[in-house]
Amino acid sequence: MSVFADLVERLADLLHPLFAASATAAAIVVFTALVRLAIHPLSRSAARGQKARARLAPQLAELREKHGSDRDRLVAAATELYARQKVSPFSGFLPSLLQLPAFFLMYRLFSGARIGGEPNGLLDHTLVAAPLGGRWTDALADGGVLGGAGLVYLALFGIVAAVATFSYRHTKCQMAAAPAAVGEQVPGMGVMFKIVPLMSFATLITVAVVPLAAALYVVTSTTWSAAERVFLYRDVPSAGAPASVV
């Protein structure tokens, strides 16, 4: 934990000339971007896997027609098809799972009163008027919604709501354009695909309950995900949009 704290402090020192008292908050944003950049190759691989699954839709539809009355044989045949084409139906979740350790490190770093037996000086750092170790309830108790800290949270909520709405519309359009056979061959996947577009809105709850430092990590990562998805799936047609001609 102390090594992680040193990394954040070193980044903050580098950024202090530009961001002054909010340098630690800027360091968290930079750290998050570095984490997302490190796992970007996995995100690209996940995007290729999703596109490959879409290309398999006609074959999956044939399997449904052939084994529709026998769920076990349908799942086995679909799994064999995925394995033969070297496509994993779950590859898209790997980048999200790999971010969890970094998020929990950030959470613990700004939750504990001591680090390595020493007082946690990072808790004194702020983003404008909001302490990085504080939560939304603390902001409400100290000045209310329109207080200095409260306004910081309102700005974060606004960013999350805008990104979540954009991600929801973008993902829904892509799913509407994709054949229905995709995701219906593995039990539970159809339900998962319906839930995925709504996941970004859950970030609003996360931002409200975790320390501000962890909230900054989540907001930065969510915004990165939205931009990354647009870039990686720019060649995938959406519902209502004409497919590109190569």
Image (cartoon, rainbow, N blue to C red):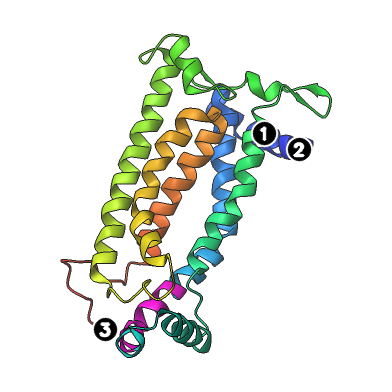
| Quadrant placement of the C terminus | bottom left
Neighbourhood count class around disc 1 (C-alpha, 10 Å): few under 14, some 14–19, many 20 upward: some
Q: Is residue 141 above or below residue 232?
A: above
Q: What residue type is labelled 3?
A: Val
Residue lying farthest to the right in this orientation: 117
Is residue 189 one of those drawn in magenta? no
User: Foreground residue, 65 or 114?
Assistant: 65
- Residue 199: x %, y % from top left: 40, 49
| Residues at marks 3 and 1, CA–CA distance in whole angstroms | 49 Å
User: Foreground residue, 101 or 195?
Assistant: 195
Q: Overall secondary structure of the magenta stretch?
A: helix
- In the rendered image, which residue does mark 1 sit on? 108
Question: Circle 2 — which element?
Answer: loop
Neighbourhood count class around disc 3 (C-alpha, 10 Å): few under 14, some 14–19, many 20 upward: few
Would residue 25 be seen by someone viewing this image from the given angle? yes
Q: What residue type is labelled 1?
A: Arg
Which circle's residue, 1 or 2, is located before the other in the chain?
2
Nearer mark to the viewer, of 1 and 2: 1
* Contact flag, marks 1 and 2 (Cβ < 8 Å): yes
Would residue 129 be seen by someone viewing this image from the given angle? no
Q: In this view, does 148 lie above or below 97?
A: above
Residue 244's disc number: none
Q: Which residue is drawn at 35% across and 77% down?
A: 54
As drawn, is 72 to the left or to the right of 164? right
User: Foreground residue, 104 or 11?
Assistant: 104
Question: Circle 3 — which element?
Answer: loop
* Contact flag, marks 2 and 3 (Cβ < 8 Å): no
- In the rendered image, which residue does mark 2 sit on? 1
- In the rendered image, which residue does mark 3 sit on? 246
Q: Residue at x 36, y 87 (%)?
A: 67
- Residue 19: x %, y % from top left: 53, 28
Which circle's residue, 3 or 1, is located before the other in the chain?
1
